Amino acid sequence: MRVLVIGNGGREHALAWKLRQSPRLTELLVAPGNGGTAAIAENIPVLANDIPALLKVAQDRHVDLVVVGPEEPLSLGVADAFHAGGIRVFGPTQAAAQIEASKVFAKDLMQRYGIPCARSSSFADIDSARAYLGQQPLPIVIKADGLAAGKGVVVARTRQDAEEALEASMVRGAFGKAGSRVVIEDFLEGVETSAFAFCDGDDLLMTVPACDYKTIFDNDQGPNTGGMGGYSPPEFVSANMFEEIRDAIMAPTLLAMKQEGRPFTGVLYGGIMVTRDGPKVFEFNCRLGDPEAQLILLRLKTDLLDVIDACLDGDLKTLTLDWTQEASVGVVLASPGYPGDYPRGLPITGLDSVEKDIAVFHAGTRLDGDHLVTNGGRVMTVTALAPTLREARDKAYRNVQRIHFEGVQYRTDIALRAVGPK
C-alpha cells in the first residue's frame, strides 16, 4: 500500500513511524514532512494546506491512502477533495471538521444534545459580549471561534484580562477572521485529560487516555503553547471514569454528528476536564493531538493501517485495539523564545547518543545539507516507554539531557504529579 501523510509536525512523524511498521506498507510519502520524517519516508515539498498540489501528488504517485494530520487542511476540505478524486482518505470532511474549526458550532452541538460541558454563550458583537461578561463570575474563559493555532483561548482571572481578550479578538483582529466571533464560557475547575476515539461514522473505538501540558513553564506557569509534553496513562482516569467519558461524551457526540448530517470518520479528540461533578468537555478536535499522538501511538500494538481500513470500511465493530500496558512519557524540546518569536536554523547535536529504544519525534526540524537544524517553535518530542510511569519519566529526561541546540527550553515537571517526588 502506498500511503501519503499530510503535515510536518511531531504528530505526523509519529503517524509515519507507526505506519512504517506495517508489513502492508510499500511506499511512504510525507508532505511536507521534516528532518525526522526524511529518515523513514520520502518528503514531498508541498504545504499541508495546498490542496490542489496534494491531490496532484497523490494521483501522480498512485497513492492508495492519504492520512491527514493537522486541522487546517481538514477545515479547508482536503478530505472532500480526495473523496472527489477517488482516493481513500483518513480524516473528517470539511462539514465534520467544524467540530474543531468553529467553537460556536461545537458549543451549540453540545448544548443541543446534552453533552456535558461548561455553560457558555457566543457573540458576534463586542457590546453584547461585554454586557454578558459583566454579569459573570471570574475566572472566565474567552475563546476565538475559529482556528488560531492554539492561541485563541484565554483564561481571564481579572476583569481587565477578560476585557483585553475581547478587545484583542474582536476589535484588534489578533486572530483574523477566526476571532470575529467569540465563545465566553464558565471556567472548569479540575484536572485535564485527552480522550481520543477512532471513528467510522457510526461506531468508535477509544484509544488509551493521555495527559498533556499546555503552558511553557513548570507548575503550569506562563503562556499557552501547542503542548510541552505529556504522559499516558493518567493516574486520575479510572476504568469507571474512562467508561463515563466514552458513554456520556464521545459516543453521544459521534451520534450527534451523524444526526446533524455530518458523519465523523477519523480521530475525534475530546479535551476533558475531570471536575467534582464528573467529566466535562472543554473542546473537541477533529484529529490526533500533539504531543498526545506520540504517547498513544507508542503504546498501540495493532497495525495502524488495519485500524484506518476499519474506520474507512465502517468495520470498527469487528476490530479490537491491542495496547501495551507499559507507560509512555514525552518531553518537548522547544526553541528559545517560544511561544513568542524564536530563531530558526540552530544546529542540533546529540541525537546519535540517545538510547536505542527512545523515540524522538521531530516537529520543527529540517535538514540543511547533512546537518539537522531547528525550524520551528516546538522542535522535537523525546518519548520513552517503560513498565512504570516513573521509569518512563526517568528514561525520557535522561535522554533529553543528551540532545542540544542553543537556548533549548523544556519543562522539567512532565508526569511529576503522577509519580510524586522520589
Image (spheres, rainbow, N blue to C red):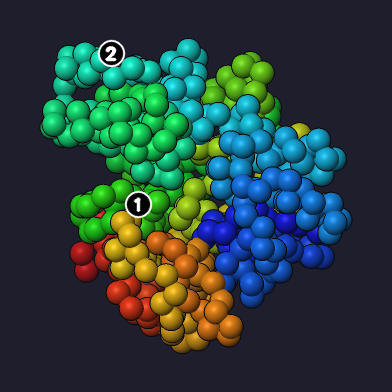
Percent of width and height locating residue 212: 38, 51
Percent of width and height locating residue 325: 51, 58
Kindly identify the amino acid type of the residue bearing the numbered disc 1.
Answer: Thr
Front in this rendered view, residue 299 or 37: 37
Residue at horizontal 85%, vertical 56%? Answer: 60
Q: Quadrant of residue 283?
A: top left
Kindly identify the amino acid type of the residue bearing the numbered disc 2.
Answer: Ser
Which circle's residue, 2 or 1, is located before the other in the chain? 2
* Residue that badge 2 annotates: 128
Front in this rendered view, residue 248 or 56: 56
* Residue that badge 1 annotates: 225
Residue at horizontal 29%, vertical 63%? Answer: 337
Q: Quadrant of residue 18?
A: bottom right
Query: Left or right: where does residue 25 sit relative to residue 222?
Result: right
Residue 282 appearing in the image: no
Residue at horizontal 72%, vertical 51%? Answer: 54
Q: Are marks 2 and 1 in contact (CB under 8 Å)?
A: no
> How many numbered discs sit on the rendered protein?
2
Judge whether 309 appears above or below 24 on screen.
above
Q: Residues within 10 Å of mark 2 (few under 14, many from 20)?
A: few
Front in this rendered view, residue 102 or 352: 102
Secondary structure beneath dot 1 equals loop
Query: Left or right: where does residue 145 sit relative to residue 412?
Result: right
